[in-house]
Amino acid sequence: MTTASDVELHIASFVVQHRPEAAAALTVKIDESGDMELAREGEFRSIVLCECENQYAILDRIDELRAIPGVLNVLLVYHHAEPREALEASMPHAPDAGVAP
């Protein structure tokens, strides 16, 4: 039987607004998650990337980040769902356009 997690991959990005003293706890939480990555760390804002099995997992990650002391807000900036099969397929090669080296 095929489950939803076998079928789709959800990719999201968040902007996390935080106090400077929350940066260390934010980094620890992201490192422990296994499905989030700190893309850009700033003094008051950071960008987090997330690849989860479904939209509910993305909402859970947002709640987890919001629960960190010193985090003021977590904004979902981007969300995309695509079949895993499509993401794992190789890209077709474009024919040469006749551009000389």
Image: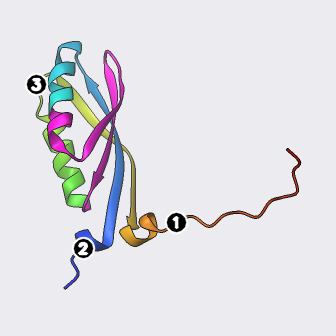
Question: Could you tell me residue 34's position as x and y percent?
Answer: 20, 45
Q: Is residue 26 above or below residue 20?
A: below
Amino acid type assigned to the residue bearing label 3 in the image: Pro
**Label 1 residue SS:** loop
Disc number for residue 4: 2
Mark 1 sits on what residue? 90
Quarter holding the N terminus is: bottom left
Query: Going by the picture, which residue comes out furthest to the front?
Result: 101
Question: Could you tell me residue 87's position as x and y percent?
Answer: 44, 64
In-image side of 35 versus 84 (left or right): left
Identified at 19% across, 35% down, the residue is 31
Tell which of 43 and 28 is nearer to you: 28
**Label 2 residue SS:** helix
Identified at 30% across, 46% down, the residue is 50
Which mark sits nearer the N-terminus, 2 or 3?
A: 2
Q: Quadrant of residue 29?
A: top left
* Residue 48 within the magenta-colored segment of the rendering: yes
Question: Could you tell me residue 20's position as x and y percent?
Answer: 23, 14
Query: What span is colored magenta in the figure?
Result: 29-54
